[in-house]
Image (cartoon, rainbow, N blue to C red):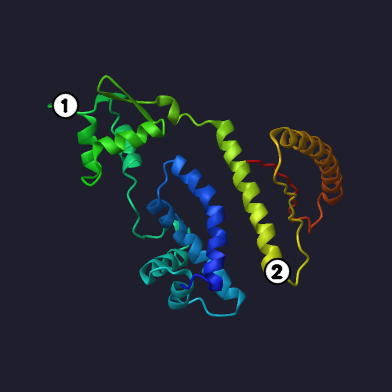
Amino acid sequence: MPSDSPSSLELQHVLMVMEHLTQWLVRSGIGYTEFSAALKPIFYQQAEQELQRIGQKATISSISLLAGLHRKDVSAFKLAQENGQQLTQAKISEPINVPSRVIGLWLAEGLAPSMPFSSQDGLNFEDLVKRISSERHPRSVCNELIRLDIVREEDGQVILQQRHFIPDGAAQEARSILSQNVKMHLAAGLHNIYGSDQTPFLEQAVRADGLTTESVEILQKASLELWEKLSIHILKMAIERCEIDNDKADATKKFAFGAYQYDE
């Protein structure tokens, strides 16, 4: 793809967003192969929608060409749809997440929460890893699990961090809110780019550079104060409109209004 082609330029813009999403993925223990595999049904679905938008038939060839997916994967997704299944249930090749599989096996077999990293006899972490994969070094797998705070290592023992398997409601809620906010923000921006014949959404930001720490702190405080006043005002209006629209047959729309502040 030429570096100055429209597609290449679009890709550069998307990669700016992906830098932070990739940071999120890597810190969560999700690698490239798992993420790329998880993207397949999304690319399939978007290709279908684009073909529908331009009035073309969604054949295996057309979807494969548009989404960049292997024809075998496209066929599997189509078969899943015909069987009334979710796209994620399609039988396609998936990468093996060795650290996750190791922990899954550890828990599934009800093994002791602590085991030696290596030993001449008896169950040990090295053997557990080798039961999953002979291509990943047990030390690398252990280091990755330590990084993710799933295990810790003390005196040659690999110990499961039981608290890791207790869902953190607050943390998950924060991630859910973030993903919803980013999704809606991107949807608004892309609507404005591609929906030129439609009313644009509000999608603006104020930026300033060459500032001191003191100036940034003043702007931060002002931003929070303004957001508090504005959010309360919008919330009151939204509650009033919800009451007015209650039980109306066409009351199916959603509304979102947000703000963010960032400095570096």
Which one is in front, 158 or 80?
A: 158
Task: Say whether marks 2 and 1 touch (CB < 8 Å).
Answer: no
Residue linked to disc 2: 195
Q: Residue at x 38, y 72 (%)?
A: 71
* Residue 218, horizontal then vertical, whole percent: 77, 34
* Residue 142, horizontal then vertical, whole percent: 30, 34
> In the image, is residue 109 above or below residue 68?
above
Identified by mark 2, the residue type is Gly
Which secondary structure lies at badge 2?
loop
| Residue placed furthest toward the bottom | 56
* Residue 20, horizontal then vertical, whole percent: 54, 47
Which secondary structure lies at badge 1?
loop
Q: Is residue 9 visible?
A: yes
- Mark 2 Cα within 10 Å, few/some/many (few <14, many 20+)? few
* Residue 80, horizontal then vertical, whole percent: 43, 63
| Residue placed furthest toward the top | 155
Marked residue nearer the N-terminal end (2 or 1) = 1
Q: Is residue 108 visible?
A: no
Q: Residue at x 70, y 69 (%)?
A: 195
Q: Residue at x 41, y 34 (%)?
A: 148
191 relative position to 156: left or right: right
Q: Report how far apart the C-alphas of labels 2 and 1 lie in the structure.
A: 63 Å
> In the image, is residue 10 above or below residue 223?
below
Q: Quadrant for the C terminus, please.
A: top right
Residue linked to disc 1: 119
The dot on residue 23 is none
Which one is in front, 143 or 82?
A: 143
Q: Residue at x 35, y 40 (%)?
A: 100
Which one is in front, 61 or 243?
A: 61
Identified by mark 1, the residue type is Ser
